[in-house]
Structure formats: structure tokens, C-alpha cells
Amino acid sequence: MTKNTIKMWIETARPKTLPLALATILTGSALAYWAGSFHWGITVLCLLTTLFLQILSNFANDYGDHQKGSDTAERIGPLRGIQQGAISAAQLKKGLYVMIALSFLCGALLIGIAYQNVSDLIAFSMLGVLAIVAAITYTVGSKPYGYLGLGDISVLIFFGLLGIGGTYYLQVHDISAIILLPAIASGLLATAVLNINNLRDIEQDRKAGKNTLAVRLGPHNGRIYHCLLLSIAALFYLLFALMNLRNPVSFAFLLTYPLLFKHARFVFSHKEPVALRPMLAQMSLIALLINGLFSFGLLLG
């Protein structure tokens, strides 16, 4: 395997999006610590499982788009290995199988360590299978939901409600409605990363029949939607902190709000899709920073 091929595999894994997995598990585990229960082994296995699922989804996205002819030379984002010919469709398909196996193995170990009763075992086994299926069928299959504009809902669920809620429950073995605020907030930031990607590729996706939510909304409304995602996320983090945290240092996450505002203003004011290329990585890192500081506040609070 040449250095260029290795580079293409790494690029296909989309490392700029992977901080989202870390942000999700970090916040879910910090919430568990705040609730009085924390388990290093569960946290690590949650992180590995989420990373493998995200890479699986990224591999499947490129494979599905390639099969449908959606990724062309008009693409504004970086060309992946399969587009450049460095990775064949057959090789990428094998990569999918490897990621499925790793996701399944880590998920099985996680459930084996964390479950306390048969209900937990059944529920999280079903959720694990559902997560693998959802990662693949975003762009793969006869009716991929990513082509129907449902990707945003999927990201909100898996990087918010299930990602944080599941990480919390597997350590606390209880669920509290109050954690919905940071769970939804984290999911909305992850959805904003997807929206940047879709706004950037909006014209190509429209031509290819990939009706993402950005395509359905149009460029202007898609930018308004992006600002709403960030605003609601910022509000939900703040509401949780005001209701539950007393240490002033626990509000350190507010230091990231100017970054959120600056990012939102840039996305809203720059109409050319090519200008959004660096915004995807920026949004991913901002999400990690907010969740990191929010989690730090939970440890103190």
C-alpha cells in the first residue's frame, strides 16, 4: 500500500468530522460523572464504537455517492480516494465490512460490560444494529434517506439523543429529562456540521437528485436554518447550566459563543459555496470546544 493510498483512506474517513464523536461521548460521560456515576471502560468503548460507526458512515457515504454518480468533478469539497481512483469500489466495500465488524465488536463489548438486566441487553443490542444500518443506508441502497433530506434528523438522533443519552444511561442506569437539553444541543451542533457540507455541495447535489435538506430549503433558507441550529444549541446549553450549575467557572463554555456568532455571520453573509470549504472543519472544532468546556463545567458543578 503506497503512501498516497494510505492518505486517501485517511481522507475517506473524513478526520475533520471525527471530533463530533469525541464531543458526544465527552458530554455524555461528563453528565454521568455529574450524576454521580462514571466508568472509564464504558467511556472508552463508547468512544471507539462511535468513532467506528462514524467512519463506517463516511465510507458508506462515499461508496453510495459513487454508485449513484453523485460525486463528480464539480464537487467543491475535497475529492475522496474513490473519486480519484486511488481506492476502487471493491476496496471501499471491503473497508465497509471492516468498519461494520469493528463497530459490532466494540458495541458488543460495551453492552457486555455495561448492561444490568435483560431489558438493557435487548434494547441496546437493537439500537446497535439500528446504528449500523443507519450508518450504511444514508447513501447506500435503493432509497437512501440522505437523498430524501432526512440526514439532519439522523445526525440529531445519533450524535445527540442516542449518543449522549446512551452514554449517560450505560453508566448511570437511569435517565433524566434534564439531560435532553445538552443532548439536543450537541446534536444540533453536529447537524450544523452536516448542513455546512450540504450547503457547500448544494448545486452538485441538486443536479444529482440528492435532495438534502439544504437543497429543499435553498441556499438562503439553508443559511437561516444554520443560524437557528447554532442559536438553539447555545440556548439549551445555557438553560441547563442556569438550572443546574452554581460554580461560575462552570459557565466557561460561554467563552465559545463569540466564535459561534462569528461562524454564523460568516456562513450567512458568504453566498458562494466555495467560501464554505474551511467552515466544515471549523464547525466541527467549535462543537468539540463547546462540549469540552461544557463538560469541564459539569466536573466542577
Image (cartoon, rainbow, N blue to C red):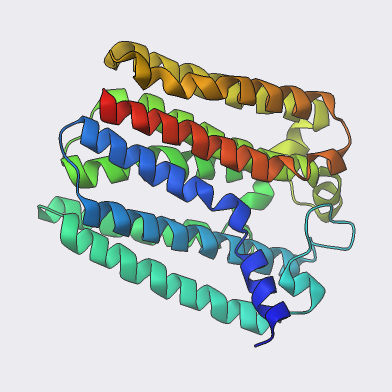
Residue, x 35% and y 11% (percent of image)? 242
Q: Could you tell me which quadrant the C terminus lies in?
A: top left
Residue, x 62% and y 68% (percent of image)? 10
**Residue 65 in the image: x percent, y percent?**
72, 63
Q: 290 left or right of 109?
A: right
Q: Which residue is nearer to you in this view: 231 or 205?
A: 231
Marker count (numbered):
0
Q: Is residue 2 visible?
A: yes
- Farthest residue, direction bottom: 1
- Farthest residue, direction front: 249
Residue, x 89% and y 57% (percent of image)? 74
**Picture quadrant of residue 149:** top right
Residue, x 12% and y 56% (percent of image)? 118
**Picture quadrant of residue 259:** top right
**Residue 120 in the image: x percent, y percent?**
18, 51
- Farthest residue, direction left: 117
**Residue 258 in the image: x percent, y percent?**
62, 20
Q: Is residue 225 visible?
A: no
**Picture quadrant of residue 152:** top right
Question: Is 2 located above or below residue 159 in the figure?
Answer: below
Q: Which residue is nearer to you in this view: 141 or 248?
A: 248
Q: Which residue is nearer to you in this view: 259 or 128?
A: 259
Q: 7 left or right of 32?
A: right
Q: Could you tell me which quadrant the N terminus lies in?
A: bottom right
Q: 133 left or right of 26?
A: right
**Residue 104 in the image: x percent, y percent?**
36, 69
Question: Is 287 located above or below residue 269 in the figure?
Answer: below
